[in-house]
Amino acid sequence: MVLHLWLYGVFVICGYLCSYVKSTVRDSPGDYYTSQHGLFKLAHAEYEIANAVSSYIAVLERRLDVAKRYLKDFESDAVSSNTSTTNFPEEEKSKGLTRKDAISATSTAIDASAFLVTAHPLKSYKLLRRYVKDLPALEKELRLDEERKFLKLTEKVKTNVPFPTQRDMQGATEGILRAHDTYNMNIDDFASGNFYDLPTNASINAADCYFIGIYSFQSTILTRAIEWLERAYKLVVRESDDSISRKEVKDKLDEVVSQHNEALSRRSKNPYLFAEPVKRHQYLEDKLPRKRLLDTDNHVLQNKHSSMTDLTNFAALCSGKQLRDNSETGQLKCWYGNKQPLNILSPLKVEILSRQPPVLQFYDLLSERITHKVLESARSTLGRSQVYAKTHPDSKMISSSRTSTSTWLQDDTRSKLKEITGVYRKLEEFTGLNILQNGASEDLQVSCYGIAGHFNPHLDTIFNSVERKHLTKEELNRGDRYATIMFYLTEVPRGGSTAFSRIGVEAKPVKGSAIFWYNMDEHGEPDPLTLHGGCPILYGNKCVSNKWIRFNAQSNHQCNVAKFSIPT
Ligand SMILES: O=C(O)CCC(=O)C(=O)O
Ligand SMILES: [Fe+2]
């Protein structure tokens, strides 16, 4: 529970400064770890590469066979070249010719051997066969430039799908650490793909664990560094995984452990230490989970700005902890919203996730067909998501606080997304908000997350996050983002909830459902209680889409006094 402060905090200096999300940057190498679509392309292209590797191996094996067969045949009739004529093999004597015969004709062992070949019709026959058939076959094999062929193929693949870079490895490692930490999982389970009660039949090898350990060490997360290196050591020693040498892992582990113990003894400020010194040379022993020096498990729901509490609450909610007491959660319920004409025949299935401020989840809102269409329409234009940051010259930047790709879809009635208009109509009726009128809401933003993809706690409102000079006149006229409707477009088997860290709400990403909340309070100010974020995905692909409803089109609104009434 400690590491996330680093993962969310140190990498991500901006926290919820970088809240407002607008533009995207098109796919580029180095961004694969944030892009489900990019990872899909890589996984797809790897089939072509793996096929080429397989053909390459087949050719090398055939080559080796031809070469070995030739040599075996030669050696069956030859006298070893370092046999001296005085050591003429006994064997040959029994075969009809004596040393004397050979010596009388020759002066070296090779001469003797050649002499014996010439004397033997079958050996001579084979000699000719080797020259006429076997050697040309081997030459032909060797002339096939398999290396060039293979390299040409990878070059071709690269022009269509640029290869990932070190930055991708780094992003993927950060993602692994983030997911491991947020869900506070046992390292052996996590590294062997057992996600709680879900075995996934995938694991990483000793060299992978070593790499993650080194990365944690370089980032001075000594607790995790020790755990990952211990896992690597266990794999090389117990499970004889030879992807890395035992010595290399052991030396690094000793180094990290002594650095850890030394930091502990001098009461270093490093928050990533165990409470007790780590015993050297006991790396393979099964031990109770080590206690950490700093555990931040006291969660307080609060309105105040405290990024520390926000982040610990966020991680706690992501992993399913209940932060509200029963008196509050007891008031939550589900009901059918069928009071309005459009909703009579197919009532909205509504669940209250929070009463004040209201956060609602609507189930079965989008059909399979619509979610598919939205994802299809978004696919070709997805690009690395950015966040807005006041401190940045043009007010927006790529940030590790949001590891996803996104795009905008025009959802006016002419486009092929017109079916979604019916859904907006139903929601208009239910909420009393204007969604469809020109300028009342933004285009639909679609976001898909990458490896352990997440979005740090943030507010959806814009005006607090962007310098005025960066807002267009039109933007200012539309007013801020009054309310959010966020659709879940995919099922996420593990992780990926949306957590509201100040009000203790965790919404599960149920495909076809949507969550709704107001971002502004009754005075038209951003409501800090709506601070929310996307939890890291543990297993699955997560895509969401946001429909942001603007303030100034809500002519008859009374902020936060909705047309719908939440049943008591
Ligand atoms: O993915 C999520 O659960 C949250 C996304 C979000 O808050 C956003 O896109 O603004
Ligand atoms: Fe958001």
Image (cartoon, helix red, strand yellow):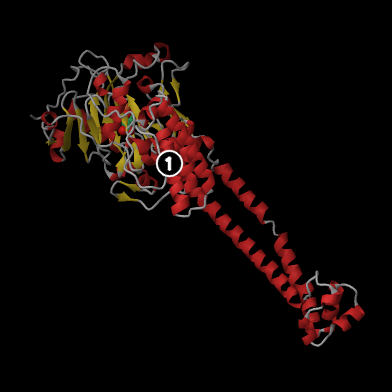
Q: Is mark 1 within 8 Å of ligand 1?
A: no
Q: Which residue is at the front of the view, 432 or 1?
A: 1
Q: Which residue is at the front of the view, 422 or 465?
A: 465
Give the vertical position of 124 relative to 557 (above or below). Answer: below
x, y percent for residue 439? 32, 22
Tell me the quarter of the image containing the C terminus.
top left
Give the vertical position of 437 relative to 125 (above or below). Answer: above
Q: Is residue 520 visible?
A: yes
List the residue tagged with mark 1. Answer: 228
| Number of numbered labels in the structure image | 1
x, y percent for residue 37? 43, 41
Q: Quadrant of residue 415?
A: top left
Give the vertical position of 552 relative to 312 (above or below). Answer: above
Give the vertical position of 185 relative to 242 (above or below). Answer: above
- Characterize the local packing of mark 1: few (<14), some (14-19) or many (20 or more) Cα atoms within 10 angstroms: many
Inspect the image, locate mark 1, and give the three-letter code of the amino acid beneath it: Trp
